[in-house]
Amino acid sequence: MSSDKPVIGIPRCSRVDDYVESVKRAGGEPVVLDATGDPARSLDRVDALLLTGGLDVDPALYGETPHATTEVDADRDGFEIPLSREAVARDMPVFGICRGVQVLNVAAGGTLVQDIPSTVTSGLPHSIDVPKDHVAHAVRVTPGTRLASALGSSTPSETCSVNSRHHQAVGQVAPSFVVSAVSEDGVVEAIERPASAFCVGVQWHPENFWRTGEFAGLFAEFVAAASRQRTRVDD
Ligand code: MN
């Protein structure tokens, strides 16, 4: 890689273009990772990991039986769970989005709420598919967190408007992680690991806003952390 830009590894997913564009606009060099081969070796090529959206994490990984609505992606789990563990162990910057925050939490020993509609009765819309940047609800961001600092310029108050395309969410927060945003109904919308250089996960889809830049600051903080760490093994 001849570029001076930090290289951001992005596990392949069905709507990868928005992740790629968001990383480019933040000054990073995106590399899409296929769920094949050794996760640790995949990480040797990158400076940071962006965990992407997709289907559900296998509940067996956190000791539960599947809910009727749970739709597992075993191939991605088999690649991304060890990938997440290894990245956190290396203190490589990690940013998890939607399924990504769920992978991050389960890989670190947390659990998930398997089906929000059958668990939370508030009726707050967490599953609005179209348009992708439709603002579905607000989240309350915990003051003093990395998330709050990264969103700083765009959110003068402590709430933030987000899109929402999920039927699952973080349940028990993994040891060493804290909650950094919740919605009004108590659903966990973001977590982070204070001991890490940058390890943040959000339940919404900030990558869908690259045209209008609402979450440009969040991608900028992530890519800046990748630039400082420079963990990749140069060829
Ligand atoms: Mn939501």
Image (cartoon, grey):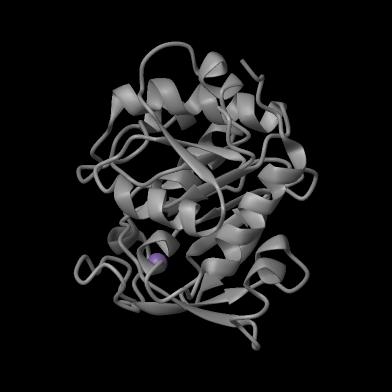
5 over 1 or under it: above or below? below
Judge left or right: residue 133 versus residue 11. Answer: left
Q: Quadrant of residue 217?
A: bottom right
| In the displayed structure image, the side of residue 174 where residue 14 appears, left or right | left
Residue 151 falls in which quadrant of the image?
Answer: bottom right
Q: What residue appears at the point 30 percent right and 24 percent down from the top-left corner?
A: 74
Left or right placement of residue 74 versus residue 154 in this view: left
Q: Is residue 228 visible?
A: yes
205 in relation to 153, above or below:
above
Residue sitting nearer the eye, 70 or 227: 227
Residue, x 29% and y 35% (percent of image)? 66
Regarding residue 110, the answer to whether it shows in the image is no
**Number of numbered tags placed on the structure image:** 0
Residue in the image at 76% along x and 45% along y: 197
Looking at the picture, how far across and down is residue 83, in whole percent? 53, 25
Q: Position of residue 146 (x, y in %)?
A: 72, 61
In the picture, the quarter occupied by the C terminus is top right
Residue positioned 66% across, 19% down in the render:
233
Q: Single out the residue that lies furthest toward the top.
A: 37
Q: Quadrant of the N terminus?
A: top right
Which residue is the extreme one toward the bottom? 157
Q: Position of residue 20 (x, y in %)?
A: 40, 48
Split into quadrants, the picture shows ligand 1 in the one at bottom left
Q: Is residue 135 above or below residue 84?
A: below
Q: Is residue 61 left or right of residue 223?
A: left
Residue 143 % position (x, y): 74, 74
